[in-house]
Amino acid sequence: MSESDLVTFGETMLRLSPPDQERLEDAREFEVRAGGAESNVAIAAQRLGTPATWMSKVPETPLGRRTVGELRQHGIDTEVVWSHRGRQGTYYLERAGEPRGTNVIYDRENTAVSTAKARELDLDTIKDARVFFTTGITPALSSTLRDTTASLLKAAREGGTTTAFDFNYRRKLWSPEEAEETMTHLFPGIDVLVIAARDARTVLGFEGDPRQLAHKLGSQYEFETVVVTRGSEGAIGWHDSVVHEQPAYDTDTVSRIGTGDAFTGAFIARRLEGDDVPTALEYAAATAALKRTIPGDVAQVTEEEVEAVVREGGEALSR
Amino acid sequence: MSESDLVTFGETMLRLSPPDQERLEDAREFEVRAGGAESNVAIAAQRLGTPATWMSKVPETPLGRRTVGELRQHGIDTEVVWSHRGRQGTYYLERAGEPRGTNVIYDRENTAVSTAKARELDLDTIKDARVFFTTGITPALSSTLRDTTASLLKAAREGGTTTAFDFNYRRKLWSPEEAEETMTHLFPGIDVLVIAARDARTVLGFEGDPRQLAHKLGSQYEFETVVVTRGSEGAIGWHDSVVHEQPAYDTDTVSRIGTGDAFTGAFIARRLEGDDVPTALEYAAATAALKRTIPGDVAQVTEEEVEAVVREGGEALSR
Amino acid sequence: MSESDLVTFGETMLRLSPPDQERLEDAREFEVRAGGAESNVAIAAQRLGTPATWMSKVPETPLGRRTVGELRQHGIDTEVVWSHRGRQGTYYLERAGEPRGTNVIYDRENTAVSTAKARELDLDTIKDARVFFTTGITPALSSTLRDTTASLLKAAREGGTTTAFDFNYRRKLWSPEEAEETMTHLFPGIDVLVIAARDARTVLGFEGDPRQLAHKLGSQYEFETVVVTRGSEGAIGWHDSVVHEQPAYDTDTVSRIGTGDAFTGAFIARRLEGDDVPTALEYAAATAALKRTIPGDVAQVTEEEVEAVVREGGEALSR
Amino acid sequence: MSESDLVTFGETMLRLSPPDQERLEDAREFEVRAGGAESNVAIAAQRLGTPATWMSKVPETPLGRRTVGELRQHGIDTEVVWSHRGRQGTYYLERAGEPRGTNVIYDRENTAVSTAKARELDLDTIKDARVFFTTGITPALSSTLRDTTASLLKAAREGGTTTAFDFNYRRKLWSPEEAEETMTHLFPGIDVLVIAARDARTVLGFEGDPRQLAHKLGSQYEFETVVVTRGSEGAIGWHDSVVHEQPAYDTDTVSRIGTGDAFTGAFIARRLEGDDVPTALEYAAATAALKRTIPGDVAQVTEEEVEAVVREGGEALSR
Amino acid sequence: MSESDLVTFGETMLRLSPPDQERLEDAREFEVRAGGAESNVAIAAQRLGTPATWMSKVPETPLGRRTVGELRQHGIDTEVVWSHRGRQGTYYLERAGEPRGTNVIYDRENTAVSTAKARELDLDTIKDARVFFTTGITPALSSTLRDTTASLLKAAREGGTTTAFDFNYRRKLWSPEEAEETMTHLFPGIDVLVIAARDARTVLGFEGDPRQLAHKLGSQYEFETVVVTRGSEGAIGWHDSVVHEQPAYDTDTVSRIGTGDAFTGAFIARRLEGDDVPTALEYAAATAALKRTIPGDVAQVTEEEVEAVVREGGEALSR
Amino acid sequence: MSESDLVTFGETMLRLSPPDQERLEDAREFEVRAGGAESNVAIAAQRLGTPATWMSKVPETPLGRRTVGELRQHGIDTEVVWSHRGRQGTYYLERAGEPRGTNVIYDRENTAVSTAKARELDLDTIKDARVFFTTGITPALSSTLRDTTASLLKAAREGGTTTAFDFNYRRKLWSPEEAEETMTHLFPGIDVLVIAARDARTVLGFEGDPRQLAHKLGSQYEFETVVVTRGSEGAIGWHDSVVHEQPAYDTDTVSRIGTGDAFTGAFIARRLEGDDVPTALEYAAATAALKRTIPGDVAQVTEEEVEAVVREGGEALSR
Ligand SMILES: [Ca+2]
Ligand SMILES: [Ca+2]
Ligand SMILES: [Ca+2]
Ligand SMILES: [Ca+2]
Ligand SMILES: [Ca+2]
Ligand SMILES: [Ca+2]
Ligand SMILES: [Ca+2]
Ligand SMILES: [Ca+2]
Ligand SMILES: [Ca+2]
Ligand SMILES: [Ca+2]
Ligand SMILES: [Ca+2]
Ligand SMILES: [Ca+2]
Ligand code: NI
Ligand code: NI
Ligand code: NI
Ligand code: NI
Ligand code: NI
Ligand code: NI
Ligand code: NI
Ligand code: NI
Ligand code: NI
Ligand code: NI
Ligand code: NI
Ligand code: NI
Ligand code: NI
Ligand code: NI
Ligand code: NI
Ligand code: NI
Ligand code: NI
Ligand code: NI
């Protein structure tokens, strides 16, 4: 059994993408990487000093082993149920500038993880952790996972483990109505909510500026902490009825996939280290900025680099 | 509507493979190619001078378009039903020498093609062709395709189109019992059968040396022609109650995937050109030998190259 | 014989370019792609729904087959005279930012296409099409092609086929004086002229702003339609004595090679679909903008993507 | 603290090699992999089901983190002292056939690991393991490591941990005389010795056929087990005064680097699983054969694959 | 013995860098290039028409030969002492945008060049040249090289050879105090000093704007010429007590490594051609601008390209 | 002016080849290398210690500079006439095993070198050398080069320079009759002839075994030395009316292109060093064997490696 401070649960896919900005339609080779919101968050937290474990159910195939191996390479522990049924989820990523725009094609149906039941998983790992984290993608993947998500949040609550949740609405997976119905039922089990301002509006039907969104969400559902993200415009933290604003750092973006996960992972790590909400938001924003300079989904950063960004906003060529 | 002499129907997958002999488990990049028995056969026939069309049902996605585009690049016509439901099939190929051995992982469930019904397809294309071809992989993919295969063979018969069929048993798709049950029901609609000696034994339960297998199959099911293949040991052709032996050519193999399809496509093309069975077998063996020197599933050969092999067994560096 | 609505005639070269922005002088590997104005136009039109055929004369070599195969992959039909004499044209492309600037080295002398005579080509294909298209590059390649261009335009006129022509002056192929002399002799056979404002000025000696250039050209040579392009500043359409302005869409450019061909192909396709000139210009500009986000010469776009740009100017990451 | 059954200690280098069989002198790119005898052994053992940990001292730099990350990817645990002094060792590998021959250039002086003292390391990890393993490379790297090797073997003995040792003489690191002097002083602390027949002869001065070498070594130094390896001719196991011969499996070799480590890791794993010496040798030989089909230093195998080789000597293309 | 107009002396390393902006920590392949300030300067000068030779001491290994071969490829002559002791220096380059920033990890201790003594080198090559050049990196590498640098400058003075020196302070090699102490002792032997404004301030303790820095340096140490560089803000030349300002050209930067060396090499070449200081600065700035569009350390430019930038600031796509 | 012992004259092309054994018809990328018989010979000789210069006429373009740069990288001097007219020759190489066979497509018409006249070249370089070398490819390229070849051989004779010539018949360049007519006219100016046994038979019409061919050629044309090569069966040297046989060394071949040139270059170098014919043949065969293990046309070997092959026939992995 793992002894991590942070435990996350969710699906990690193999991401297949043509080099540079070539079209999928014309590709002769794909770059292969592992990517998933919950493992991304675990890695970002680990890089900032919080021991982290990713839990999932994975096919016992070379593709499943490849996925797990890459997550281990990035430093986290993995605790997986190896399955003889169900696929390894994949997604195809076509990077492009405007007006073409980056596009994602999911191929994640009938996966092993979509059959994961709470009773297969080691709930003690969750109960012994300090924080349990998953996202709104997990219950969107299958009705089994809808139940499992609820059960894991319940186990965390029983174990006295803080629960954190990124709303992460994916319109290619379900409708706003389904998402709202499912997620608001989960809210009572959640301590810390991260949500994009756009999702708060279009899925949950809230109105107002991001500060108001944070406040309304926090008050209505009695979260301990709410973080409302708004992409390049930064984030809002609501905690103890106080609202904190955090601008985004300027960055030379090579890949914005995973930026939000980097933010959330760093925020959780710094909160676990004892930082107050404004300080944790600052480190979260710095980690997100560094992530955007790195190819792939994962925030391969060091604590020193994050601190340097907080301190001075990056530095010039050092030799 | 196409006006090809040969029409084939089946699934073509995207094949994803690590470079050289690397392990899937360790891969950072995949080579991408289209591969499928029925399109491979169409291409081999076209390269030997027979206009050929591949029919299928394909998802209207970049992955579906990529598959079709590559087949067109190789020179054949395509006549596809574009579908808004169902996946593009993929397979993962890990090349290796012995004792590891090359391995294939299929990811071809819930594909668009598995839902293809005869009434969606342009049956006139088949009726106007001189030969219709499919393989035992097609009915193995879904019960819908089991019906569709039967309907297409029936349409061919109605149109006076010769039917050719490669038995192609795939143990990762179905059991020998299912295969035998399904295929023997299709046999009355088939004129030309190609079958591996091993499949004749382990699936159909025939016994004897390859000559005997060919003769027993031809007699029992009243085929016009039977070709029994035996890998590097060559092939046997049975026609008009006469058996012809064709040895395999020596070859420096870089990829044996698609060798049988190259053989079959060339055999059909030469028969359509009016060659007798022994001559067609000779060209088929030469095409198969050339295929083995070429990476990928497809026999990218020229008629001149095949003739040179038949004539002299290949030649030295020419400059 | 093809039954395409659009038939184009011209040279398509193999384009050899070092990866990224490396120097030709230092290259260890070249990317290989097919590129030519007339095939680019055919592909862009086909992608917007107009069946298109590219005609040419091509060496019967692996290089010639490679060129034709790539065009077929992109969806168009090809109708080529296979030649045993003459080279496959190539060009070397060195991509660079300013002040180095992208540079092109042509190696296109003594090609097969430069010997193409009208009597070798299937003129019925042109006569049965709705539009015939070529560019000012074709007559610049050889005196034989000067005659051939005139003959093809004449055949189109005889067949009642609309003729479209992109002026496309290339200073590395001939002098402004030669170009003017040749092209103005071709003008009476042309219905739709596309021309860069710069060429109208420096080769044809016209003066004025682009609106004036379009009007003067249209009036003086009695074209049915004139399109004057001006790069990132958009284009002017002149038709029925009315001038329409079309701005260019903003775009994150990865390759501007082929932008004009994308524009022209889309314009022709939409006109064939029945759109009026301003609407066709809008789709042409959208197609050109998408092209600039795509590596290579070819507008690998879908009709849906073009419509999305017209409707909303592109969209954000969709998942 | 790790709870692995097997703990190994040693240096793992970054291995830089030109693609295919290109010359270092001409290289424009290097493949990068981690490789070291002791981590190779740990990985092979882990793949066969024995939890394994690699201990070392590593620079706290991107290069050090890269090395550790790759080992974690391959499934083992790592327990490293992160150092602010000392280099990451590298080696350059030029692959070639005969008569050129594969060549290795070491660049491993002044590394972090060469300064590792026993008191920096967590000796409890060794004491709690069932087997501790290192090789003759370790004491060859520095005088500090000579002392450390002795101390670690002593700690293992104190903890009741079996000690295994691969003689692994490297002539580019020290002279036969130095090696003999150092290693024979270590022998009393070693339970299981693996040694190449050639090293037994040229470094230790023993004579006779491999069976005799095994017997003489075992008797003279009172080892529990001696394994004498002889490359493609197989291996000899000596245990309880009985000698067992194990031939090598035939294999299509793509890389023989790491073959011996694969053998040793599998032998240790199977002995820990309770197999007798002849059975463990059989699995060791099968693992070594599979390794030779895999690029890189590491035996990325599965237990099922090894068992299949033992059972049937590999199998054909499976689909 | 070489007969070059310019002779430079210093270390050239192999530079290992992951593709694109990937992290060293995650790299599977490195691009390999040779890079060193003194060879970069020699190449830039040669490209502008000044025959140039790079002198050094290099290990007689494939890595040493590779380094020398690449410099010869770029057109300069090399005159090296081949050494059987000492490493080939390497450095790892991780390219990144802000806020991550490009980072360099040196692995250049115990190199062959660090042991180079003046008596091993062919001093006549220096005495017969018109200019001798080295940088502040050279004396930073070892105490031996501190003496050697002084001896080479002395030999140049004896031979009537002009001496040029780029201050090039590297904080990863030595402290500002060590640098100041060493370099100011070398100043009396130097005719032409190139120095970054930042180094003049933080290492030498000068104050003022760049014009003042140039004037103070030139006056205090009696240089013939001083060039103060300030990155994207251009450079200042001081000569005969007159100060000349040269702005930097706009450029699409792909790699700024080597920009200063390109500037200095071009400046020296043009001064040798007889240009006055303002003209030489203009060519230097143009060469530097072109360098920034080229991957790698080296100014692979032509004289014609540099002249085109001076004349018109670069030009558009030419075809 | 160069001061090389060996001067060669001829064409060096850019060689474009798909990776691995892919087909030209399917290629998306080409590897780029310089290759030409006369530069290959110069490089092989230089690697064995003979200073060598390659003379030619080359287009003043990035492609021409690239060619020259690569030759310089490999260590030889180049003395070229830079031309503003004429192409850089290229050839396309498709590697394949049997029965496909490696194939070469020349694209070398209208090159700069084909216009090279003796009066453009620095004949003193030839006159001051100890050996001048060219091959039968040179006079095959143009009638101008036929004259030039004769003039250069004449200049060598005037300068007292030994002349060496590799017959190198290329059937894609001219007919056997043309070759015989031209070459036998050149024979009186040649001291050392290298010729394949096959060419002696099919072009010159000689008969007999290789020993007889060597003797007949030597006697009839009064050569000083004749070497008859026969591929993997070794070579025959005839000198002073004595015949010496040299078998070929076994080798793991990755590329046999350039093997003959490696042999010839090494033979010349060793003869210049004073070795007798049998010893020179032994070194030549060893160099040829090493060449076959190296990708590309060029014998990137060291004198030590060649000596090791002569001494012991290669060695095992050294570490
Ligand atoms: Ca490869
Ligand atoms: Ca790679
Ligand atoms: Ca490839
Ligand atoms: Ca590159
Ligand atoms: Ca690229
Ligand atoms: Ca490459
Ligand atoms: Ca390879
Ligand atoms: Ca990559
Ligand atoms: Ca790239
Ligand atoms: Ca690569
Ligand atoms: Ca590529
Ligand atoms: Ca390569
Ligand atoms: Ni790449
Ligand atoms: Ni690539
Ligand atoms: Ni590649
Ligand atoms: Ni990763
Ligand atoms: Ni690769
Ligand atoms: Ni690779
Ligand atoms: Ni293909
Ligand atoms: Ni590359
Ligand atoms: Ni690359
Ligand atoms: Ni690439
Ligand atoms: Ni293309
Ligand atoms: Ni490569
Ligand atoms: Ni690895
Ligand atoms: Ni790559
Ligand atoms: Ni370079
Ligand atoms: Ni490749
Ligand atoms: Ni490659
Ligand atoms: Ni080369």
Image: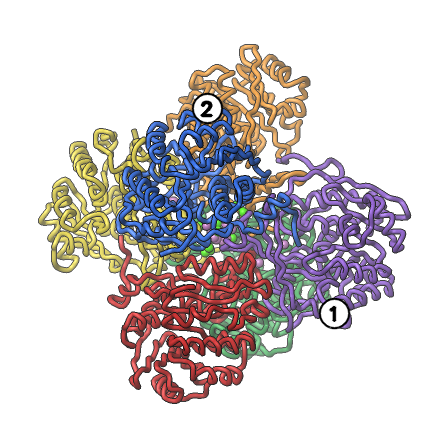
Chain colours: A red, B purple, C green, D blue, E yellow, F orange
Residue at the (36%, 45%) spot, across then down: D156
* Marks 1 and 2, how far apart at CA: 72 Å
Q: Which residue is mark 2?
A: D207
Picture coordinates of residue D179, whole percent (x, y): 35, 31
Above or below for E58 versus B217: above
Residue F77 in view: no
| Element type where label 2 sits in the image | loop
Q: Residue furthest top?
A: F241
State the residue position of label 1: B144
Residues at discs 1 and 2 both on one chain: no
* Residue type indicated by callout 2: Glu
Up/down of B275 relative to A31, above or below: above
Residue name at image x 58 percent, y 65 percent: A87
Q: Residue B144: give x, y in percent of width and height.
A: 74, 69
Residue at far front of view: D240
Chain to which mark 1 belongs: B
